[in-house]
Amino acid sequence: MAHEYILGLSAYYHDSAAALLKDGEIVAAAHEERFSRKKGDERFPRQAVEYCLREAGITLADLSQVGFYDKPLLKFERILETYLAVAPRGFRSFLMAGPLWVKEKLFTDRDLRKALGGYEGDLLYAEHHESHAASAFFPSPFEEAAILTMDGVGEWATATTGVGRGAQLDLLRELRWPDSPGLLYSAITYYTGFKVNSGEYKVMGLAPYGEPTYVDLIYKHLIDLREDGSFSMDQKYFNYLSGLTMTSEAFNDLFGGPPRVPESKLTQKEMDLARSVQVVTEEIILRMARSAHLETGMENLCLAGGVALNCVGNGRLLREGPFKRLWIQPAAGDAGGALGVAQLIHHRYNKRPRRVTTGKDSMKGAYLGPSYSNEEIEAFLQSKNASYERLDRPELLARVSQALADEKIIGWFNGRMEFGPRSLGCRSILGDPRSPRMQSQMNLKIKFREGFRPFAPSVLKEFASEYFDIDCESPYMLLVAPVKKERQIPMGEDGRKVWGIEQLNLLRSDIPAITHIDYSARIQTVSRDTNPDYYDLISAFRDLTGCAVVVNTSFNVRGEPIVCSPEDAYRCFMRTHIDCLVLGPFLMEKAAQPQLQEDAAWQKEFQLD
């Protein structure tokens, strides 16, 4: 009997991706940006598609169906109605977007088939939030669950409540454009000088440095929040309906001035705004979740959509919400829509049953991207005349754990690349969490990014409760929880006098490199059955130091996607202050490498976000 192969695609907005199912099993999934090296690449995911087919050993002719993650005609209807509703104010914006839609996006079917080399099989479309909901529920470890999706906007919906039972998925309720939890957060992201669709996590990281000074102002003027989590936004303060910016002059007047100029000095005002919008967003999430619980009566909740990447909100939902268990799609943003539409086709269109392994999701740890053989890695290193040692596993783990204990920074490249925005121990930069200097060193010398940005811990699953107040797994780094009270270092009188970014310099625990200023951490629990090499490295570090935690940040520099290939990893290694690089079984010391000739054009681009 022939196998059923379904290819899912997301593209043409931001963060395009491809995902492939074989008889319902997730075979491969990847972001296009990892191959093209263009951050947030929105173009057709040609290289991601090629990878997925290669991983499965098939061609386009073997595909049963191809699915696209939203409905372009429905989206065009929303855009056209929006421009007509605000005319003539939206005319300038329409002149920019209208021709693009007429020329390109209305012909998505034709363009997709052409991009797929003349593919003539079934090409199916799902609504944007259905794709999110499917990516949240179908891979989850639950037979049945409530579903919550929240983002900027799909076609018309900006948030949905649904329910999944077995192979059935139904959306029950939606919040509609222009009222949007994602766009509210993005408006503050824009106003505080960060880039929309990529800087929202910076706002979340900045929030603990501020006070919730503007919460009442947001509730009084910007949004009318109802008990069920739905709300309406006063559009006079926003400009995304008719203009080319997120906020309006009325917004500027309300908050006392124009948006912060990107890259300029952060002030207490930006920190307070970040804290305020975070507080409001958490309240929206909690109210929507309570409403979903009342409506569905379920004990489990599945989350997806860009807002589901707000791991601080997820942590509060876990601790304070009405659900017993949460599961969050690791690729919660638009990239995950590619996976969702493929699963909708498999279960809804092809009417295939769903198999659930109790307590275990079907994401394979999100390790769904390409891997490279030892022979491929060594051939590359030889082509660069790199200096390296090939070590057996015990010696490699011993050498790397000792280097970590010596406060060296390690580039760790091993196994299949992660799907989703987080590095989970296959494309990671690692450090010693006990070092008070590690956070500032990694931010400034490795990542070349803002010093306030926190780092996450990877902790052996069975030791997580010794370090953090968490009683469940967090394999995808999507939950924030407090560091254990007994590990915290209380603030003395002098510490309470420090405000803003200066708080960074105060030690808060015995694992200071991963303890944020509010004593929290964004946790990844590491299990041996999903990533044995990474698990064994942390175990070796624990045997050496007594610490079952390492600092884990994504293997990239500011403005670049996470590395995909050995070449990407080596380039990043040579252009930063990473001390050692591990590529599979090969270990490299920076001091032993031949000098890489710096590319002036790359250097110039590299300084920009």
Image (cartoon, rainbow, N blue to C red):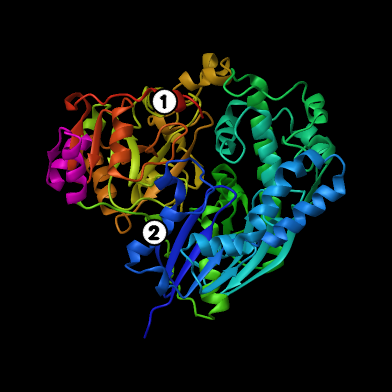
Q: In front here: 337 or 477? A: 337
Question: Image height check: is 128 above or below 241?
Answer: below
Quadrant, the N terminus:
bottom left
Amino acid type of the residue that numbered disc 1 sits on in the rendered structure? Ala
| Total marks in image | 2
- The quarter of the picture where residue 486 lies is top left
Amino acid type of the residue that numbered disc 2 sits on in the rendered structure? Glu
Residue 581 lies in the magenta stretch? no
Left or right placement of residue 248 versus residue 40 in this view: right
- Element class at badge 2: helix
Please report the residue visible at 47 percent of the width from the left and 35 percent of the height from the top.
Answer: 485
Please report the residue visible at 33 percent of the width from the left and 39 percent of the height from the top.
Answer: 568
Label 1: few (<14), some (14–19) or many (≥20) C-alpha neighbours in 10 Å: few
> Magenta region: which residues?
374-401
Residue 466 image offset from top left, x and y in percent: 38, 43
Q: In front here: 237 or 325? A: 237
Q: In front here: 31 or 285? A: 31
